Amino acid sequence: MSSFVLVSCEVTVSNGPTVVGDEASDETLMESLGAKLVQAKCQSYKHYVTPRAPRLVMEDLDQMGYQLVGTSGIGQTLVWTFKR
């Protein structure tokens, strides 16, 4: 079974924070990325955020066997898609 992870951050933020999952994401994986489940004001959903830079998160995912399969820019947000 395939496993996908979306990693995103604001264009102007190269040092973190980095969004690494939603509330249905694998808790063990999120913990290994140093992410905490948060819910911002006025949002109806929770997501996992790590204070680490996107580059460090991507290096960790690579070491865990995930491969980068897509990148995109949406407004002021960068998104990377990984698959294992």
Image (spheres, rainbow, N blue to C red):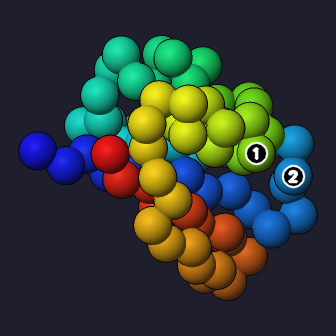
Q: Which amino acid is tagged 2?
A: Ser
> Taking 44 as reference, is 69 left or right?
right
* Quadrant in which the N terminus is drawn: top left
Res 82 seen here:
yes
In the image, residue 79 sits, relative to residue 18, either above or below, namely below
Q: Which residue is drawn at 66% across and 69% down?
A: 78
Indicate the position of residue 23 as horizontal and vertical percent values.
31, 36
* Quadrant in which the C terminus is drawn: top left
Indicate the position of residue 27 as horizontal and vertical percent values.
33, 20
Q: Which residue is drawn at 87% across and 52% down?
A: 14
Out of 43 and 81, give the one closest to the viewer: 81
Q: Mark 2 points at which residue?
A: 14
> Taking 54 as reference, is 43 left or right?
left
Q: In which quarter of the image is residue 17?
A: top right
Indicate the position of residue 72 as horizontal and vertical percent values.
58, 78
In the image, residue 8 sits, relative to residue 1, either above or below, namely below
Crowding around mark 2 (Cα neighbors within 10 Å: few <14, some 14 to 19, many 20+) is: few
Q: Mark 1 points at which residue?
A: 55
Res 43 seen here:
no
The count of marks equals 2
Q: Residue at x 87, y 42 (%)?
A: 15
Badge 2 element: loop
Q: Residue at x 60, y 57 (%)?
A: 8
